């Protein structure tokens, strides 16, 4: 009987507090001064601001990919390449070129890997096109699309929203155009995933009120 009570005591001391973790606004997450519109309809938007050359963004990718295998049904995930200074625009154009050509699923993760694992230094769209050819794809659409009107528009939107989301670095997660958080605010990668789920549920409840 004493062993059973001891086991129960351990359960309440070590298990329940973590399961009932409380998050603090202005510590673990921040509310944007001006809520931003979302484009996910009835679903809660979970948006990641990232930069391909950011090692912290690359480190977060496996955790996001695992989460994306079974996200909450009421959530839709969106990527936004942050443009916090002019030098970041090149990689934003690369991402939106992939988007325009329907190649994100095929090239997003490999492009990250090429930069961080293979130490590739892409400085021109011709270098990116050559890399795409190495992947067995036709490089010409990459060259034709990189400076297209459609990509121009998406890049301009990303530059505008990067400021509106009030972030000073990446990766940053924005929930439903309202709440902003980061790995450092959450306390770790797995903790960020938990916090994303919490904020998404909170946003859904607030929409219903």
Image (cartoon, helix red, strand yellow):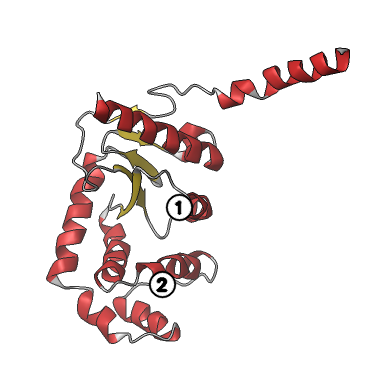
Gap between marks 2 and 1 measured at Cα: 16 Å
Residue furthest toward the right?
A: 2
Question: Which residue appears at 39% of the width and 67% of the height?
Answer: 105
Q: Residues within 10 Å of mark 1 (few under 14, many from 20)?
A: few
Quadrant where the N terminus is found in the figure: top right
Q: Quadrant of residue 128?
A: bottom left
Circle 2 SS class: helix
Question: Which residue appears at 23% of the width and 53% of the height?
Answer: 158
Whichever of labels 2 and 1 marks the residue nearer the N terminus, that label is 1
Q: Position of residue 136 (x, y in %)?
A: 42, 86
For residue 155, above or below residue 196: below
Does residue 5 show up?
yes
Q: Position of residue 131 (x, y in %)?
A: 41, 80
Does residue 47 show up?
no
Q: Position of residue 202 (x, y in %)?
A: 36, 29
Q: Residues within 10 Å of mark 2 (few under 14, many from 20)?
A: few
Apparent side of residue 82 relative to residue 19 in the rendered image (left or right): left
Labels 2 & 1 near each other (Cβ < 8 A): no
For residue 127, above or below residue 44: below
Question: Which residue appears at 19% of the width and 67% of the height?
Answer: 151
Q: Position of residue 117 (x, y in %)?
A: 55, 67
Q: Quadrant of residue 142?
A: bottom left
In the rendered structure, find residue 68 and report the number of the disc placed on it: 1
Comparing labels 2 and 1, the label whose residue is closer to the camera: 1
For residue 28, above or below residue 88: above
Give the residue pinned by disc 2. 106
């Amino acid at each position: 009987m004493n062993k059973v009570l001891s086991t129960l005591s351990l359960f309440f001391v070590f298990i329940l507090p973590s399961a009932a973790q409380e998050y603090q606004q202005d510590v673990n997450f921040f509310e944007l001064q001006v809520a931003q519109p979302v484009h996910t309809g009835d679903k809660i938007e979970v948006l990641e601001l990232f930069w391909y050359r950011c090692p912290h963004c690359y480190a977060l990718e496996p955790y996001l990919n695992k989460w994306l295998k079974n996200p909450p049904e009421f959530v839709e995930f969106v990527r936004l390449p942050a443009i916090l200074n002019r030098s970041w625009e090149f990689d934003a154009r690369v991402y939106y070129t992939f988007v325009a050509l329907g190649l994100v699923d095929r090239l997003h993760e490999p492009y990250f890997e090429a930069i961080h694992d293979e130490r590739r230094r892409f400085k021109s769209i011709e270098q990116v096109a050559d890399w795409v050819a190495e992947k067995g794809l036709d490089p010409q659409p990459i060259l034709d699309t990189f400076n297209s009107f459609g990509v121009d528009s998406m890049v301009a939107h990303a530059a505008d929203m990067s400021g509106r989301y009030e972030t000073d670095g990446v990766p940053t997660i924005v929930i439903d155009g309202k709440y902003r958080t980061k790995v450092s605010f959450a306390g770790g990668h797995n903790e960020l995933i938990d916090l994303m789920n919490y904020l998404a549920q909170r946003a859904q409840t607030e929409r219903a009120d």
